[in-house]
Image (spheres, grey):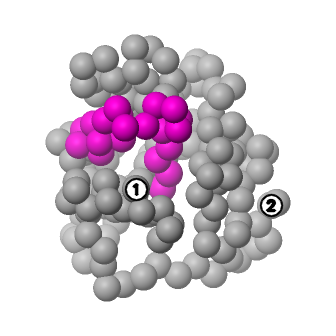
Amino acid sequence: MYIRGFFFTVAMIRFTSLTASDPVDLLPQMMLALYAEDPACNGKRPTLDSCRQTIRFLLQHPERGRIILLTENEILCGYAILIPYWSNEFAGTLLFVDELFVMPELRGRGIATAFLNSLKNTPPFEAVGLSIEGTKRNARAKRLYGQLGFADRANEMMICPLRPHNR
């Protein structure tokens, strides 16, 4: 069953699904900051236009994924992109945390931990499991994910682009 929105509050930290009425001025810049700070191994980076396209697409097709705003005391601290997909192996929907970003100056306050725990406790899209990706060199993120129950798998994800990636 599709859940229309995602809303969770821990103390003064809130996680809400992006809506068309939300101001999204900072969101594309945060998306670019994630890749500037921790570039993908293949060197691919989104552009400002591709970030805006992702926002538009997920707002128009919430069944395909959701952008979550992470706020503390009503100040935007970061965002996450959640993508559901069916897994034969897990016999249900896995929720892929495609991107998770907290502003550097706000890290270490438990925002990402609270967010991931909220997904575990109240999984949207009736997810039976969570998956997350991070670059191998981001030891801090990998340590956090491991502490929260995420484990490396024997399988590695490989990607074959089908069309040129915008740069």
* Tag 1 near tag 2, CB within 8 Å: no
* Residue sitting nearer the eye, 111 or 17: 111
State left or right for residue 69 relative to residue 161.
left
Q: Which residue is mark 1?
A: 140
156 relative position to 124: left or right:
right
Q: Foreground residue, 10 or 87?
A: 10
Q: Foreground: 85 or 111? A: 111
Q: What residue sits 63% from the left and 81% below the top?
A: 160
Q: Nearer the viewer, mark 1 or mark 2?
A: 1
Along the horizontal axis of the image, is 12 left or right of 22? left
Q: How far across and down, in percent of the image, does residue 126 sit?
A: 24, 49
Magenta-colored span: 98-118
Residue 104 place in picture, x, y as percent: 53, 38
Does 113 sit left or right of 101 as displayed?
left
Residue extending furthest toward the bottom: 154
Is 1 included in the stretch rendered in magenta? Answer: no
Q: Amino acid at mark 2?
A: Asn
- Say what secondary structure mark 1 lies in: helix
Q: Tell me which residue sits at (30%, 78%) in the image.
A: 153
Disc 2 residue crowd, few under 14, some 14–19, many 20+, Cα 10 Å: few
Would you call the spot at circle 1 few (<14 residues within 10 Å), some (14-19), or many (20 or more)?
few
Identify which residue is drawn at 62% across, 52% down: 37
How far, Cα to Cα, is label 1 from label 2?
A: 29 Å
Q: Is residue 32 visible?
A: yes
Residue 167 is drawn in which quadrant?
Answer: bottom right
Q: Amino acid at mark 1?
A: Arg
Horizontal and vertical percent position of residue 61: 54, 43
Give the mark nearest the N terminus, 1 or 2.
1
Residue located beneath label 2 in the image: 166
Q: Who's the residue at 31% across and 54% down the image?
A: 144
Q: Secondary structure at mark 2?
A: loop
Which residue in the rendered view is the most extreme toward the top?
73
